[in-house]
Image: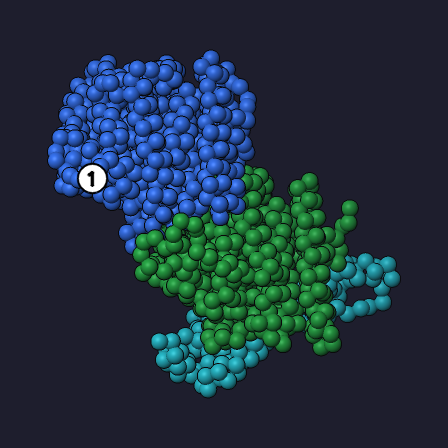
Chain colours: A cyan, B green, C blue
Amino acid sequence: MDLLIDRFNYFAYVVLMMIGLHAIISKRNLIKKLIGMSIFQTAIILFFVSIGVKEGSTIPISEHHAEPAAEHGAQAGHHGEHGSAGHTNNPDHFANPLPHVLMLTAIVVGVATLGLGLAITQKIYRQYGSIEEDEILEKLRSTDV
Amino acid sequence: MFDHTLMLTILPCFFAALAVTACGLWKPRWSLPVALLSVGISLFGSLAVLAEVMTQGRVQYFLGNWSEPRGIGIEFNVDPISSLMLVLICVVSLLSLIYASGKITEELPGKEPLFYALFLLLMGGLLGICMTADAFNLYVMLEITSLTSYALVAMGNGRRAAFSAYNYVIMGTIGASFYLLGVGYLYIRTGSLNMADIFRIIQLESLQGSPTITVAFIMILIGMLVKMAFFPLSGWLPNAYTHAPSVTGNFVAPLMTKVSVYVMVRMIITVFGIEFTFDHLPWGQTVVWLAILAIVAGSIMALGQSDLKRMLCCLIIAEVGYMVGGAWLANIHGMTGAVFHIFSDAAMTLCLFLAAGIFHHKNGTGEIGSLEGHFRKMPITMAAFTLGAFSMIGVPPTCGFFSKFYLIRGGLESGQYGYVVALLLSSLVNAILFFRIFETAYFGNLSEGHHDAHGNDDHEVEIDEAPPTMLAPLVATAAGLVAIGLFNSEIAGFIQRSLTPLAVGGTW
Amino acid sequence: MGEVVESSKPLWACLVSLLAIVPIVRNRRSPNVRDFWSFVAAFAKFGIVLSMLPLIRDGKVIECTLWEILPGAPIQFRVDAMGMLFALVASTLWIVTTLYGIGYMRGLKEHAQTRFFAFFALALSATLGVAFSANLLTLYVFYEILSLSTFPLVTHHQDKEARRGGRTYLAYLLGTSVGFVLPALVYCYIKTDGNLDFSPDGALSGLLSGKEAMVLMLLLVFGFAKGGLMPFHSWLPGAMVAPTPVSALLHAVAVVKVGVFCILRVITGVLGVETLRAFDLGTVIVWIAGFTVIVSSLIALSQDNLKRRLAFSTIGQLAYIILGASLLAPKGLTGSLMHIAMHAFGKITLFFCAGAIFVANGRKYISQCKGLAREMPFTMTAFAIGALSVVGIPPAGGFVSKLYLVWGTMEADMYQATCFYLVSSFLNACYFFPIIFAAFFQKPENPANGIRESHPCCVAALCITASFTLLLFFHPGPFYWLANMMSQVVF
């Protein structure tokens, strides 16, 4: 039970992934398959985001107090994580922003894939008049004699 | 010298893709020259990188000059294997672009600028995969290549192009997602995304026994196995490559699966290290058995095909089995053979696909039966096809013989006799397949029986060859097959520079 | 091994026929010019080979490296006594075969003659490549090129039978070379740490255990299936669908001789006499070859098709050669090498005769040969001489080589081998003499025909080879001392 609560995010994402996979494999409607694929990708994104969580942490935006320009310049190349003497820039206080950043990319990729999938489905519909996989396979088989 | 040769190789692709799209709206006739120019610049860049790697051992580049701390900046790192891959991708791109320029108005009328734009993006993505040293950047590049290849396959006007592309989308996305998941697990445990850094942290904190790292490896491996069409995860490949327009097929077929194999090799040698992969993980033998299964399955499937391109696709599945098996033999000759086979197979696949495209162009169909009497009708194409076939069978001095030589050597040294037997059997199956085609092309019309004409030869069968834009890349590739074969020991030696114990984290 | 001389002559000998393909193809519309070029190439090749003879006689070895294709196993030519012998046989007989081929193809008004002569030239290049190979890899490369370049020749008629014959041909030859020789080759490379050169003591001497040597030997001996050891012999009768000049090429000039040559190289240069003696593997090959000798002679007795009977006779004779070498005795090896030459001349005569009979009056079967000597006196006399040589009766050259072979069996104390030789000689007589008897002493079915020989080129060719067969009995010449020289080097 403790394990379930401690690692809740893992269980959640596995369940979501399986739902997505199940939809891909067992659904016959092309749109539903795409939705399943989307759920699959989203589960992974959620998982990644969840690992950036820290108890009692705040959003990773560093607060700039009045500091000498030189030190500020030295910090310019780093994110808020690697703070120097400034006591407000203690990395332990901030949630890890890196997974979020990575997932922005992944979300974009997911959106692009979904858009592409939908465009292809549209083309299939125009060609076969149906978006049910069974009907399409039937049409293919009958013309493939 | 110029410090930014790496960026010279990859950036023109992305910028040119934008330029070509703009051309498409404004002056479509400029799209081909812009694309050719971009590929030319990339080829030049990749050769410069190769020269640098030959002298200095590797090229390292930090994007935006963000070198410290590692893991924040995106690093590009090119070692001997990567530099050869870069040249391979550029050369194959150039040859298929030349072919495409001749055929595209016929296959995809009105969509030329779109095709070229996607082509350039795909090329850029492939180059990026081979030069990046950051695991997540690899995912981004992988998805760039995947998305563009889905679109390129779906662009076909044939009946089944869109449906095959749909299947490809689903399977490909699952594969890439598994890879992403694997990278996620690596990040959780090591806190870094930079390949060399991950390796350092695994060694430093002795994480080899950690289940997280093992699961990460499995996820990444499964993801790449889907992408490289390793049997039985290969269901998407025959349909996708057969029904894609031939201009797409020629470009995607030689490269996509091979680059995925490269990623697997890169993960094994740079990120996880061979000690972890072969000594800690207990299932190396299982992978070799699965590879044997892939080789056998691919060969058997190929025997049942009557369409030339489909047959070649099934042979690709068998060849992937060669490479995976070779890599997992856990000795240096097997790994050298697997990497050498990447280049060899890319050249062979390009040659055979180009020839198949020409046949389809001339005969209107891809059926093997339509090739009757082609030795007389299309001597140059058939000669190039014959060279490609000999390379697949493994006749010296083509490159196919030498990849088999290294792989068999690796197999014998590791005692994997099953793998060696599978390799030999598949060579013989290839011989059967290609000689069936030669019989059709040579014997022509059998019902005529004995002597045809009298005395003076060859009652004139017209020579009806393909146009030069399609023929030139084919002849160049066929020549390349022999060249790779003749220079195989230099190439293998160069590859082995990436496989030194220092580079791969352990002794073979 | 004697002093090494660097020269590009072996390369030129090999290339001359390859280069000739260009004028042959370009002149496809003028048959006389085209055939002239075939002759030019044949004589040039013979000339170059002959010019290397004095150097070999002095005990030197001619080397020519083409390309460093694998570390330690370059594509390299090295001409020693054995290679020289084979090259002489091949280049001499090519001249005669070209003459015969012209007569045959024109006599039958065959199609695609240019393709025929072009691939012939290619096959001869590959044959010389094998003869001059310096290491196992080069041998393998040219062996494969030979298999592939003879395929269009075997399937020349392009009908259903040709297709079937071609399939059998390739299935056996490619199957054994890829399936057996390739892994053996790689294994040798691993064991010798990257050095596949033929060496007089055997490249693998001292490196193998008994089991490894046995496996390797079996793989290589059966793998070079052109040598015709049973059970991988079926390609040879299957290849009889080819036109007769091709059969002559297959049986005498190139293909089967390449096969036994490769096996002899394996025995002497790769595995080595020491290793074979140490593990008593010579006896194994003796039994395999002996079995082939007897069984093939028996099968030959039952064949009515003349060419098929000759095919099985060849299988037996090849096994003679392999048997002689596997005796691991100096006289045995000398006999084997001489028999390559003697059998070549004898067999080619027999095939020329069979083809001439077919061209003249379309007969393929022995039962049709009654009284043929009245119609075709030159042909049948030559046939008789060829038969004498194969059976091993003086004054034909075959007697000399058989003498040495039998002597070798006694030297090696392998009396079962002596039995094999004597019994099979008897069987050879049994299947040849009925033909000669029928032709000379029986009444023909249509007695009114006068002398009706086949095309003059064919007759000229077979007369030349028959005369050589007789000549070799009296002056075994270069074949004798080359064979002897090789034996001395090996033992």
- Can residue B379 be seen here? yes
- Whether residue B265 sits left or right of residue C469 in the image: it is right
* Relative image position of residue C118 (x, y in whole percent): 45, 42
Q: Which quadrant of the structure image shows residue C243?
A: top left
The disc labelled 1 sits on which kind of residue? Asn
Chain hosting mark 1? C
Q: Residue furthest right?
A: A69
Q: Is residue C445 above or below residue A34?
A: above
Left or right of residue B387, residue B446 in this image: left
Q: Name the residue nearer the viewer: C398 or B146.
A: C398
Determine the residue positioned at 32% across, 53% down: B450
Looking at the image, which residue is at 42% across and 40% down? C120
- Left or right: residue C447 versus residue B331 is left
Residue C36 appears at what percent x and percent y?
48, 37
The quarter of the rendered structure image containing the C terminus of chain C is top left
Q: Which quarter of the rendered picture does the N terminus of chain C lie within?
A: top left
The answer to whether residue A65 is above or below residue B193 is below
* Residue that extends furthest to the left in the rendered view of this protein: C442
In this orientation, which residue lies closer to the viewer: A69 or A49? Answer: A49
Q: Which residue is mark 1?
A: C449
Residue B206, percent from left and from top: 53, 48
Q: Nearer the viewer, residue B95 or B167?
A: B95
- Residue ranking furthest to the bottom: A129
Residue B148 on image: x %, y % = 59, 69
Residue under the point 51% across and 34% down: C15
Asked if residue C231 can be seen in this view, the reply is no
Instruction: Give the residue drawn at x 51%, y 58%.
Output: B463
Label 1 packing within 10 angstroms: few (<14), some (14-19), many (20+): few
Compare residues C328 and B145 and report the one nearer the observer: C328
